[in-house]
Amino acid sequence: MFPLKDTVMGASTFFASALPHDVCGSNGLPLTPNSIKILGRFQILKTITHPRLCQYVDITRGKHERLVVAAEHCEKSLEDLLRERKPVSSSRILCIAYEVLQGLQYMNKHGMVHRALSPCNILLDRKGHVKLAKFGLYHMTAQGVDVDFPIGYPSYLAPEVIAQGIGKPSDHTQCEKPLPSGPKSDLWSLGVILFELCMGRKLFQSLEIAERLKFILMLGCVDDIITVLAEEHGCLDVIKDLSENTIALLKKCLTFQPSKRQVLKELLHDSLFSEISSLYPPFHKPAGLFSSSPRCANLTLPEDISQLCKDEDNDYLAERSIEEVYYLWCLAGGDLEKELVNKEIIRSKPPVCTLPNFLLEDGESFGQGRDRSSLLDDTTVTLSLCQLRNRLKDVGGEAFYPLLEDDQPALPHSNSSNELSAAATLPLIIRERDTEYQLNRIVLFDRLLKAYPYKKNQIWKEARVDIPPLLRGITWAALLGVEGAIEAKYDAIDKDTPIPTDRQIEVDIPRCHQYDELLSSPEGHAKFRRVLKAWVVSHPNLVYWQGLDSLCAPFLYLNFNNEALAYACMSAFIPKYLYNFFLKDNSHVIQEYLTVFSQMIAFHDPELSNHLNEIGFIPDLYAIPWFLTMFTHVFPLHKIFHLWDTLLLGNSSFPFCIGVAILQQLRDRLLANGFNECILLFSDLP
C-alpha cells in the first residue's frame, strides 16, 4: 500500500439488504447474510493500489446489516470546483480527464466498473491530482444486488443504464442478476462531469429525478448532444470558447450509443492527450516479496540524491503505509462506528418509533414515514489521527528507521530499544495491544521481511520474541522458508477439472471455522475450494483427509488476497509437521505418533498417565484430531495464531509438547473424573 503522506483516512457507512429469516438456500442451510457476502468481496479491493484510486483499508459489520468502510480520503473534490461557479480552463479539463481515465482503466484491468462516478467521488489531493473514491461500491455489492439503494447518481447515469432499469431478483434463492454495467457507462458519466466543469455549473438542477432520466434518454434523438445540453442550460457562448481538443473529448465521452462510444484504453492513448501524457509516467505496482521480478526493478531515484534525506516536518508516521497507520489508529482507541456516531451519521432510533401508527387486521400499516436509513449516505467522515499522534509523541525518528546489524545479541532480546526489550517481558496480549510497541515491531519486521531471505536468521530471532499480528501471514511464510515465484506455480495447477475429492471438499468447507465472517463468506468458500484442490492435485501421492480444511484455514485467513501464498505455506507446513500423515493408509503413522505421545505423558506426569490408562481414556480417543489438524480443529483461530507463532519456531516433535501442555492445564479435572466425564470435557474444548 502507498504511504499516507498528503491524504487522510475516512469512514463511510451503508446497509446491506436484509434477507427473510424463513428462507433457506438450495443446500437446506440458512442464507448467507448479504453483509457477509459484501465483506468477502470487499477484500480484493484492498489489493488494488494506484495513484489515481483511493486505497481501501478495512470493512466492519455492525448491527442490522450495517457496514462501515475505511478508505483513503481527500478533503477536496470536483464538487468544490463546481461550487465556485467558474468555468475550468481547457488545459485543466484535459488533465482531470486524463487522470480519471488512468484510474478507470486500472479498475477495468481488474474487472471492475465504477458506476457511481460523480464530482463528489472525484477527489483532489493537496497537489491537485485526482483520486477516485467509492470505486468499489458497485463490485462489493454484486452490481447493486445486495443493497436496497441504486448505485449511481441520476444526472450522471449513462443512457443504457437508465434504459435497463434497476431490477432485483424477487426470489432470494435464485442467482438472477441485472446485466452489469460496462466500462463505457463510466465514460458517459465522465463526459457529463467534464461538461459541468466547462460550464462552471451543475446540469439538470431544475428538473425532478424522473424528468432528468427522461431527458437523458431523449438525447438519443438528437444529432449534437453537446449543443443541446448547452442550449438547455443557456451556455452556448461558453461552448464556443472551448478548445478543439476539449470539444472532441466531450463528444467522444457523450456518444449516446455504447457501441459507438470509444473504449477507455483507446481514449487514454488518443492524440487529444499527446501534450500531457508525457507528464504522467506509467504506473508499476511494486513487486511483492515472493515475486519473480526484482523488487527494485522499477525503483526511481531523484537526480539530486540529497532530496531523499530532506526532512521538512519530521512527520515519520505519514511515511508509513495506510494499512499500518489504520492498524495503529485502532490500537490507539480508534473506533469507526464511534466516529460516525459523533458526526451523527449513525443515529439511534428508539424501538417505539419504528412501530406503525395504525395497523389493520390484514397487517397493512399506515402513518409511519419511510425509513431512509437503508438508503446510501454519501458522507465520508475524516478519521482524526490526533489520539494516535499523541500516543506516539515520544517515539523518536530513529524508531522508524532501525538499523539491521549482523551482530545480534543473544535471544530473546530484540533489536528495539532497551525500553521495548523490557516490554517484551510483558504478557503477549498486552504487547499486541500496545501502540508504541507494535509500531516498533511492525517497522522492524517490515524492514527485515524486505531483506528476506538475506535476513532470514534475524526474522527467526525476532519471531522468538513475538510476531506483530499485522505481518503474521508473511512472517509465517518466511519462517516456513517459502521462496520463489509462487504465483506462477499456483496458477499452473489445474483447479477446474473435477476430481473424486470435490464432493468431500464441498461438504467440509461449510463446517470449517464458520463463526468467522471472512471464512464463512461465499468468497471465502471459493478460495478454500481452490487452495484445497490445488494441494490435492499437486500431491498425487497423498490424499485428502478430513481435517485438511481446518489446516488450511489459518493460512487462508492470513493471506486471503493471496491464494498462492496460502497454498505455498500449507505445502511447506505439511511435510515439516505432518510428514506422511496424508498417505492413503496413514494408520501406522498415526499409531506411531500416538505411541510416542503416550510415552511423553508417562515421562512428564506418571500419575496422570496411570489414571488415564486405568479408566481407558487413551490418546486414540482424543488426540488424533489434535495432531492431524495441528490443533486447528480444536481451538478457534485467534488461539491458533498464538499457538502456531511458537509451533513454527520448533521442529516436528514440538506438537507433542503442546499436547502435554494441554493435558497439564486440565490435569486436576482429568484426575478427578472418570471415562465419561473426560469424554465430555474434551468434546467441549476449548
Image (spheres, rainbow, N blue to C red):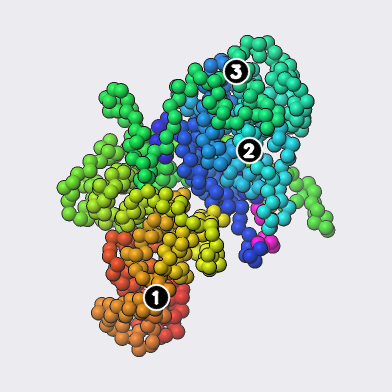
Q: Quadrant of the C terminus?
A: bottom left
**x and y percent of residue 15 in the render?**
62, 47
Q: Is residue 488 magenta?
A: no
Left/right placement of residue 33 relative to residue 172 reads left
- Residue beneath label 3, please? 246
Dot 1 crowding, Cα within 10 Å, few <14, some 14–19, many 20+: some
State the CA–CA distance, disc 2 to disc 1: 52 Å
> Which segment did they paint magenta?
18-25
User: Given the image, on which type of amino acid does mark 2 rest?
Assistant: Gly
Q: Nearer the viewer, residue 273 or 235?
A: 273
Left/right placement of residue 657 relative to residue 675 reads left
Can you tell which quarter of the image residue 33 is in? bottom right
Q: Which mark is residue 182?
A: 2
Q: Nearer the viewer, residue 449 or 119?
A: 449
Callout in the foreground (3, 1):
1
Q: Considering only order in the chain, which callout, 1 or 2, is on the residue closer to the N terminus?
A: 2
Q: Is residue 673 above or below residue 341?
A: below
Can you tell which quarter of the image residue 360 is in? bottom right
Q: Which mark is residue 586?
A: 1
Q: Is residue 252 above or below residue 645?
A: above
**x and y percent of residue 175 in the render?**
67, 54
**x and y percent of residue 37 in the render?**
58, 52
Q: Considering only order in the chain, which callout, 1 or 3, is on the residue closer to the N terminus?
A: 3
State the CA–CA distance, disc 2 to disc 3: 24 Å
Q: Which mark is residue 361?
A: none
